[in-house]
Every structure is written in C-alpha cells, then in structure tokens.
C-alpha cells in the first residue's frame, strides 16, 4: 500500500442516519399503529419511504456507501435480539402470533407482560432495550429485516453496507434473564451465537452485500483478558468463514485500547475507528501495531454526537497521518448520526452567524464528503469549502457569544474557598436543625407534581397565542396553590411548589441563561418514539436575572412550612444539552455553576432555607474508561460545590439523583458536600442506604420509598417496611422520607394516595423510635 493509492481510493460513508424523518413521520406512524389508526402495511410503507429518502439524500450528497439496517421501528438492539432469535419466553407467543405486535410488546410491554429493560447506550442519551439471556437461550438466525433493507437500497442503484450490532457487544450489553441463577455470563453464549451471525452474513452476501459492518462499541470500555479473548475468537471465526461478505468492525465513543491489537490481528477486512473523542490515543494505537496493512480503515473524524462544524484542516491532518497506515482510508462520522438532529438549515430562529457554526446530520454528511474529496483529490479540490470553514471557525472563536470577558474573568477568579461551605457539615447540620425544627424522619418530595391537563392546555394556548402571559401565569399560580394546599393537608414537612412553570428541567433554565440556544426542530431519539430537543450550550454562560425566585417566594408566601427552592445542577445542565467543544467541559461546568450560585444565593436572600440542586446525570456522565473518571468527578463535584458554596450554614442544601447504581460514585456523592441527598431506591429495596452506610456517608439521606415509575400506590405498610429497612443503615436523625423522583409523569389520584401513605408510614415509624 502507498499513501498515494490509499488517498486516491478515499470514499465517504456513514454508519447510520436519523430515523424519524424531517417531520417525525416515523413517530407519528408508529404511535398511530399502537393506537390502531395506522395499519401494519401503512406503517411499513412510511418506513420504506423514509429509508429511501434518507439513502437518496446521502447518495445525492456524495456518500459512496450508504448504511442499511440502521433503521429501526424502535431500537437497533431490539432488532439485533430479533435477528438472533433471542425473544424472551414471556414474549414468544405474542411474537409468533404477530411479529410486529410482538416486537412492540418486547419494547413496551403489555397489560400482562413486562417489556425488556431499557438502559442508556453508553454515555449517550439514547436508550436501548437490554437483551435478556440465560443458559437455556438458543439462538436462531432471522435475517429478514437486514436482507430486505439491503435489497431496497440496492434496488435504488446504491452501494450499500448493512450495519449490525456485533456479536461481542451484543453479549456484553445483555443481562441475565430474570430468574437465571447468579454467576451466568451472557458472554458464555458466544460459541452458540457465532453460527447465527455466520448465517446472517451468508444471507447478506447472497443478497448482494459486498461489505457488512459489525459494530463493537463495547470494546472501547475497559475489558479484561477473557472479554478480549472472546473478541479475538469471534473475529477469527467470522473472518475465517468461506462464504462471507467483507467485514468492517466498527467502534466508537472512546479509545480501543487493548482491543485494537486484537482486532488488528484478526482476519477481518477493515476497522472503523473513532478519531474524535479519543483521537490521539487511537492514532497512537494504530501506529503502535504497525498500521493496518491489507485492511480498510474507516476514519471517524467528524464528531457524530455533537452539533458543531468540523475543523476541516485538523481532520485532514489526521487523515493524512492515517494514510500509509492502512490499505485504504475512508472518511466517516465517529459514530452513527442517530445522535444528532437532522438538518440545521431547518432552524429559523437561530442567528445566521451562529447557524454557520452548527452541523446536524445533513451538514455532517457534507463535511464527510468534502473531506473524502480533499483526501482523494488534494486540498485544491475543496478550496472553497476550506475557506468557508476557516471563516466559520474564526467567527465562532471571535464571537462575543463564546467569549464574554466578564464571565471569563469571574471564572478565572474562582478560589478554592468559593467551592467550600464556610462551616463543616456537622456544624451546619446543627444550625439547620435549629432553624428548621423538623421532626425525625422528615417528609418531602423531589420537586415536580403532576402536570395537569389544565396546565398543558394553558401552555399550548400560550404557544398558539390564544392566551397571554398573564393568563398563563394565573394558571401557574393556581397549580402552585393546589400543590401547596395538598401538601399542607397531607402533613408533608418540607414543601415544594411543584414546578408547573417548567416543561423540562434543563430547557427551563437554558431558556433563561445567556449562552444557550434553543432549536425548533432539533429532535433526537431518546428511546422508541420519544424524541427530545436538547438545548445547545454554545457560548459563555451568565444569568441575566433570577430564574426561579419569583415562583419559589410566591409558594413560600402561602405557607409557614419551609418551601424548597429547586434548581438543576451544572453537570445535568451539560449532560442533557449539546455542549460547546471549544473548551474543556470542566470550564463550561464552572460557568454554569457560577450562574447557579447566583440563583442559590438569591433564593437564600429571598428567605428560602432549603434549596435542592438536582444532579440526576452525575452518574450517567461518568466516562466509559475508569482511568478518566477521577478527572471527571473532580470538576463535576467542584462545580456542584461552587454552585452551592455561597450560602449560610443554616441554609440546607439538598441534592437528588435517580440512577440506581451508585456504587462507583459514593465517594463523589460525599464530595459534593450537600446536606441532604434523595435517591431512587424503592425498586432496589433500600440497597443504596446500605451502600451509603458502608461508605461511612455522614449526611442526611432520603432513599425513595415510593416508586414513581408506575401508577401503583405503595401501601402504608409497604412504605413502613422500607423505612424500617432504611433505619438498619441510616440512624433516625439522618433519614428522610420521600419518593424516588419527581411526580410530573404521575396522575393526581395515585400521587395523592401515595403521598398520604408515605406520611402515614413516617408517622408510624416515628412512634417506634
Ligand atoms: N426536581 C425534578 C423533578 O422533580 C427532578 C427530576 C429528575 O430527577 N429527573 O421533576
Ligand atoms: Zn430523579
């Protein structure tokens, strides 16, 4: 191979594209099917049209090889489970009766049958359905979807590459089925799974696939010798098949580390590697194994999960380095474009200058094509694109939006003391006891109350211009009064205003902070037919005026009990947004923390004695590789402390987190130095209380005793039993009584009943003390 021939052959490709269509047609069709308003045939037609439109768009833009099979009615991991026949026993009958209805039953459950569990796809905000496997799982090949979609693309005259979840990642992302004896490891099924993949590959080959992509993102996580041996074995076997398409093994989201030499040595025909998130590490690793002679290298140089334009000269330089390290170098995004919105050009409300800094899936596609052309034909061939790119990057870095001197000066002046409360926890706890005068086992809620029909109607009417702001705010006040009246009557000790003014806990603050942008059409799939529109954290962050003080003080004016102020923490503000990539995340977190600090201090000045700063995303933002975690937790916990460090000892800082696996961040939970933490725990039977105790956690904690993810009302006895369990780990002076999370997705009847039972349980257990 020579660098020159590798360059000349450079091609543009992507691994996946947003599925929903320009107007979320897929969401409408799927939900219509669920409601019986759209037939299976009509749904199938809509889906086929969307796929064809995507492929045409990609091909017209200059993508040489389009992906197939990345499309999904719900989730590509669920599609993989169907492809290998891993249908849980409880869904078997439904799937056999009607494959499509059964597919959705696995995704969503039915009246009688629970769905597959859903969890986050690596550190993205996409959720996949977790395969359930056991020692009795038997796999069977079902390549119909993959073959059909390939044929559709080929029929359009396109070069197409089916994309499958790879067998190793499939097993590593699976979990033991309910009831399977402890100690079972899904990876032990590899031997059984590989022949099924071999069959699917043969089917795809027969249908005309020259290349097939096998996605192995699980290999960018820390993997032990056994797991690496499994990867080696999988690709030795699949690579050694006689009748097979050429194999491209793709990884993304981080560095391949020890998995790189394993894949480099295996008899597959190409590797697709992320050169954005872990560019330097992956580059060094490819060089260290002596390159990939004889292989195709697909270089993910365009970030597939942020929304910023590419630095084309920097990417060309990476690509230049890679030439000579492989037989052929192709250009792609770092991962599927599923994680970004479709088209920045659809945004009408974003300032024209700022819009030029943004690249959604369509714009990223053009960047990939440009880079491939530049590589193959030389930079003169893309001179126009390069000069436009240079101008856009310069406009971004020189903009007042991204460089606010006041914000920068303030962030630079932060001292260690700013990130610490004045008094140590024990002294604060005593001051707070005096000031608040709460009973043992105080009761509270996490913040939001049911979003009523009247509230939703008012919000829609405001948006449509049918009512004015004053009328809308009257509705908010009514909701606050209702929520307060209920809590007082129910006997809750620390009240909340119910968050009726918030559509979303991040968006609400993003709309009020300078430096954030909102999109009109920037929808991204979160799971199934649920799409979110993350705000864009584009510039330096500041808070022009108080954001929540007005509603909190209104609520406090209605009661003599303490009303908790309610804010979203800095890490969560970043995690559920698209964040600027032109400075370290920690710097951005610090700016957000300073804006929140002002809000916390203003709340205190307005008489709020309890303030909660939610950080549900603290755990989920944890880096994929353990080696990167301390650095992250360092800036993340510092940002929290900076936001809350400016209040008096007697002001009680609460935080809330909802993810269930806290084991690896217990130290960080301690390090944020909040006075009280509420956590999701009802489903795990207070296990978290024991984890905290085992760690020696010295503060107050409220492990949830009411599972808010279901309409089920916990009985007083049930909540009482959970509290007794909590008391085994946490002493009564430090145990709070609260639900798992906010109540905004619940209805009023079950909320009322559940909270009444929760208060009754607290009272019953207080009697026993
Ligand atoms: N305060 C928020 C609420 O109650 C917290 C939500 C969350 O943890 N995701 O809705
Ligand atoms: Zn929560």
Image (cartoon, rainbow, N blue to C red):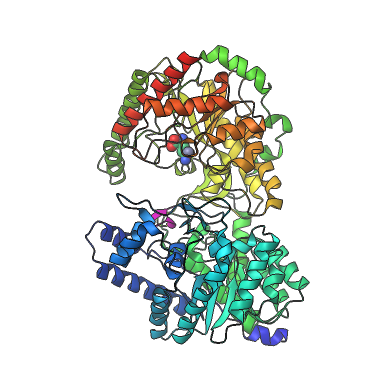
Give the image location of residue 650, x and y in percent: 59, 18
How many discs appear?
0
Give the image location of residue 292, x and y in percent: 70, 78
Give the image location of residue 387, x and y in percent: 61, 71
Is 102 on the left-hand or right-hand side of 275?
left
Q: Which residues are magenta?
A: 524-533
Query: Based on the displayed image, in which of its 4 quarters is residue 55 positioned?
Result: bottom left
| Residue 290 visible in the snapshot | yes
| Residue 299 visible in the snapshot | no
- Residue ID at (67%, 62%): 226
Is-magenta flag for residue 529? yes
Instruction: Give the vertical position of 166 relative to 718 (above or below).
Output: below
- Residue ID at (53%, 70%): 192
- Residue ID at (51%, 28%): 725
Is-magenta flag for residue 149? no
Is 10 on the left-hand or right-hand side of 37?
right
Tell me the chief SS of the magenta region: strand
Give the image location of residue 495, x and y in percent: 43, 23
């Amino acid at each position: 191979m020579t660098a020159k021939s590798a360059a000349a052959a450079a091609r543009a490709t992507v691994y996946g594209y947003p599925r929903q269509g320009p107007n979320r047609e897929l969401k409408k069709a799927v939900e219509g099917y669920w409601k019986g308003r759209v037939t299976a045939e009509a749904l199938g037609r809509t889906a086929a049209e969307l796929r064809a439109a995507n492929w045409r768009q990609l091909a017209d833009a200059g993508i040489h090889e389009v992906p197939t099979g990345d499309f999904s009615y719900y989730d590509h991991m669920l599609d993989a489970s169907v492809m290998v026949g891993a249908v849980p026993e409880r869904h078997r009958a439904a799937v056999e009766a009607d494959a499509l209805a059964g597919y959705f039953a696995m995704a969503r459950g039915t009246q009688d049958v629970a769905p597959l569990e859903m969890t986050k796809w690596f550190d993205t905000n996409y959720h996949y359905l977790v395969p359930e496997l056991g020692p009795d799982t038997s796999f069977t090949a079902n390549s119909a979807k993959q073959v059909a979609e390939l044929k559709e693309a080929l029929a359009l005259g396109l070069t197409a590459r089916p994309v499958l979840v790879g067998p190793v990642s499939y097993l590593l992302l699976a979990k033991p089925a309910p009831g399977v004896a402890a100690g079972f490891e899904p990876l032990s099924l590899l031997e059984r799974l590989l022949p099924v993949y071999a069959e699917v590959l043969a089917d795809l080959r027969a249908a005309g696939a020259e290349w097939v992509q096998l996605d192995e993102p699980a290999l960018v996580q820390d993997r032990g010798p056994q797991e690496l041996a499994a990867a080696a074995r999988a690709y030795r076997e699949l690579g050694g098949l006689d009748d097979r398409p050429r194999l491209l093994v793709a990884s993304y989201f981080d560095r391949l580390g020890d998995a790189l030499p394993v894949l480099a040595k295996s008899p597959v025909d190409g590797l697709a590697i992320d050169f954005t998130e872990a560019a330097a590490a992956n580059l060094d690793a490819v060089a260290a194994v002596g390159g990939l002679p004889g292989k195709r290298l697909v270089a993910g140089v365009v970030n597939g999960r942020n929304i910023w334009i590419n630095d084309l000269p920097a990417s060309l330089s990476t690509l230049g380095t890679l030439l000579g390290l492989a037989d052929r170098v192709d250009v792609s995004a770092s991962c599927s474009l599923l994680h970004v919105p479709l088209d920045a050009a659809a945004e009408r409300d974003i300032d024209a200058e700022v819009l030029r800094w943004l690249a959604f899936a369509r714009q990223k596609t053009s960047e990939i094509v440009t880079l491939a052309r530049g590589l193959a034909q030389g930079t003169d061939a893309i001179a126009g694109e390069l000069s436009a790119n240079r101008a856009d990057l310069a406009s971004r870095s020189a903009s007042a939006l991204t460089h606010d001197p006041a914000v920068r000066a303030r962030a630079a002046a932060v001292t260690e003391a700013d990130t610490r409360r004045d008094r140590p926890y024990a002294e604060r706890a005593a001051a707070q006891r005096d000031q608040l005068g709460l009973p043992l086992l105080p009761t509270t809620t996490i913040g939001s109350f049911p979003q009523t029909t009247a509230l939703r109607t008012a919000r829609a009417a405001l948006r449509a211009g049918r009512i004015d702001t004053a009328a809308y705010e009257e509705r908010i006040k009514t909701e606050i009064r209702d929520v307060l009246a209920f809590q007082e009557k129910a006997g809750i000790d620390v009240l909340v205003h119910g968050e009726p003014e918030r559509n979303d806990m991040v968006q609400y603050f993003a709309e009020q902070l300078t430096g954030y942008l909102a999109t009109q059409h920037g929808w991204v799939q979160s799971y199934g037919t649920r799409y979110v529109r993350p705000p864009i954290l584009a510039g330096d962050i500041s808070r022009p005026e108080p954001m929540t003080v007005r509603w909190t003080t209104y609520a406090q004016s209605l009661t003599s009990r303490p009303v908790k102020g309610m804010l979203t923490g800095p890490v969560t503000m970043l995690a559920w947004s698209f964040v600027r990539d032109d400075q370290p995340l920690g710097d951005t977190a610090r700016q957000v923390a300073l804006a929140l600090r002002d809000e916390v201090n203003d709340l205190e000045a307005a008489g709020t004695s309890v303030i909660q700063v939610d950080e549900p995303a603290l755990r989920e933002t944890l880096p994929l590789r353990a080696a990167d975690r301390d650095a992250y937790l360092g800036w993340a916990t510092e940002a929290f402390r900076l936001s809350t460090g400016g209040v008096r000892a007697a002001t009680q800082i609460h935080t809330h987190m909802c993810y269930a696996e806290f084991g690896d961040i217990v130290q960080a939970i301690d390090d944020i130095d909040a006075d009280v933490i509420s956590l999701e725990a009802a489903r795990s039977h207070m296990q978290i209380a024991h984890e905290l105790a085992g760690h020696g956690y010295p503060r107050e904690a409220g492990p949830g005793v009411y599972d808010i993810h279901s309409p089920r009302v916990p009985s007083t006895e049930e909540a009482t039993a959970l509290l007794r369990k909590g008391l085994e780990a946490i002493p009564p002076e430090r145990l709070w009584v609260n639900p798992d999370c906010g109540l905004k997705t619940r209805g009023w009847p079950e909320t009322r009943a559940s909270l009444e039972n929760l208060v009754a349980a607290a009272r019953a257990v207080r009697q026993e003390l």
